[in-house]
Image (spheres, rainbow, N blue to C red):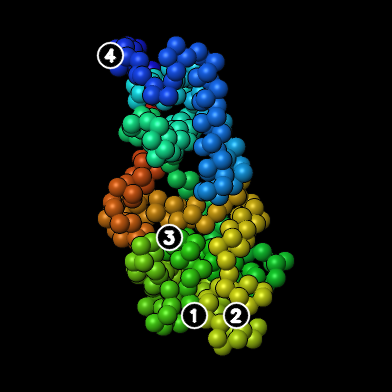
């Protein structure tokens, strides 16, 4: 909810700011003149982003919508666009937020306004950018979607008898490895059959480790579970039977013999999860989230999970503590005799 006191403070700031004197507004200029000249300015700006910045037509259309909102707000406040202050912008943010617009939506609108005023500044038409230091309301980060332990095990252990044996062996190895080691899809598709100086990553079957190149070109090694090792060995046997050229070193390949793409992994995993009877289509990052959440539930070792995921900052990993708490809360509600009163009300 918008704080009325904050709005009063904004009103006082606007009053204190007073009307600016537009250098190009004729003495006694009419409101019609202002509207016409502002419309021309906006058209010039849109032409600039269309021609000089070469933005897509859809992007230009979205910019035009954002600037129409700006014009409407300024018109209602009876302030010319070139005399807008940051206090005006903050008040309009409060109005949009109070009207139910999301923080992300407001941030996108502000980005459009910020670009417009930056251009006005370069053209020498405003002294400062009133949107420069204004930020949208913070957006609550959604919790990552993770499978329950039962669903993850059901998916990892799924075997479709009717599937092509070649695809079945490959897709089973992909699923097991994603859940076993918490790899990003790009790390998975970058794996080679053998280690080399040019390899982005590889599997050491004897050491039961995956060596990957993660974000920021940082290398890390993660353990590979027994079930994933078995699935990988099976896939390597099948892979060797199809006559893959010696120069093709990618661990996971498509039917055409080229390295499997991330998009293909997404599509195959979605198909496999539906075949396995899961209610929700699964994507690769969901298995990474499931890996992290399930390890944390069992070990409570946040630092270890950080290392396994390759997070540079522990704060990135801490989101899984919220998932872990949800798991504990559900277990408490289901098991504790005093968790709920009769009628379903919590104590």
Is 209 or 148 nearer to us in this picture? 209
Q: What SS does tag 3 mark?
A: loop
Disc 2: CA contacts within 10 A as few (<14), some (14-19) or many (>=20)? some
Disc 4: CA contacts within 10 A as few (<14), some (14-19) or many (>=20)? few
The residue at which mark 3 appears reads as: 182
The residue at which mark 4 appears reads as: 16
Sequence-wise first label, 1 or 2 = 1
State the mark number for residue 193: 1
Sequence-wise first label, 4 or 3 = 4
Image marks 1 and 2: residues in contact by CB distance under 8 Å: yes
Sequence-wise first label, 3 or 2 = 3
Q: Residue at x 36, y 19 (%)?
A: 21
Q: Where in the figure is residue 263, as x and y percent of width and height?
A: 59, 60
Sequence-wise first label, 3 or 1 = 3
- Relative to residue 312, is residue 114 drawn left or right? right
Sequence-wise first label, 2 or 4 = 4
User: Is residue 112 depicted above or below 157 in this figure?
Assistant: above
State the mark number for residue 284: none
Q: Nearer the viewer, mark 2 or mark 4?
A: 4
Q: Label 3, label 2: how many angstroms apart (C-alpha)?
A: 23 Å
């Amino acid at each position: 909810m918008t704080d009325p006191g904050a709005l009063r403070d904004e009103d006082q700031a606007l009053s204190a700011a007073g009307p600016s004197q537009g250098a190009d507004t004729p003495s006694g200029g009419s409101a019609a003149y202002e509207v016409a000249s502002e419309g021309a300015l906006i058209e010039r700006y849109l032409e600039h982003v269309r021609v000089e910045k070469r933005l897509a037509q859809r992007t230009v259309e979205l910019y035009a919508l954002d600037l129409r909102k700006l014009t409407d707000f300024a018109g209602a406040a009876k302030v010319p666009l070139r005399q807008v202050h940051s206090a005006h912008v903050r008040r309009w943010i409060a109005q949009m937020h109070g009207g139910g617009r999301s923080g992300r939506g407001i941030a996108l609108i502000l980005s459009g306004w910020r670009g417009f005023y930056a251009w006005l500044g370069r053209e020498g038409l405003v002294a400062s950018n009133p949107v420069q230091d204004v930020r949208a309301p913070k957006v609550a980060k959604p919790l990552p979607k993770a499978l329950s332990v039962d669903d993850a095990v059901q998916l990892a252990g799924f075997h479709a008898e009717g599937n092509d044996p070649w695809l079945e062996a490959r897709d089973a190895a992909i699923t097991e490895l994603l859940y076993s080691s918490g790899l990003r899809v790009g790390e998975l598709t970058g794996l080679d059959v053998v280690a080399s100086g040019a390899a982005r990553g590889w599997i050491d079957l004897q050491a039961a480790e995956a060596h990957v190149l993660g974000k920021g070109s940082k290398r890390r090694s993660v353990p590979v579970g027994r079930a994933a090792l078995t699935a990988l060995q099976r896939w390597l046997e099948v892979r060797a039977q199809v006559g893959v050229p010696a120069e093709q070193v990618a661990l996971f390949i498509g039917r055409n013999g080229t390295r499997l793409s991330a998009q293909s992994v997404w599509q195959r995993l979605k198909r496999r999860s539906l075949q396995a009877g899961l209610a929700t289509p699964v994507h690769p990052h969901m298995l990474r989230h499931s890996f992290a959440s399930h390890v944390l539930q069992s070990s409570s070792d946040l630092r270890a999970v950080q290392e396994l995921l390759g997070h540079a900052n522990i704060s990135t990993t801490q989101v899984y503590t919220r998932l872990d708490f949800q798991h504990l809360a559900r277990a408490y509600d289901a098991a504790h005799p005093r968790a709920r009163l009769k009628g379903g009300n919590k104590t």
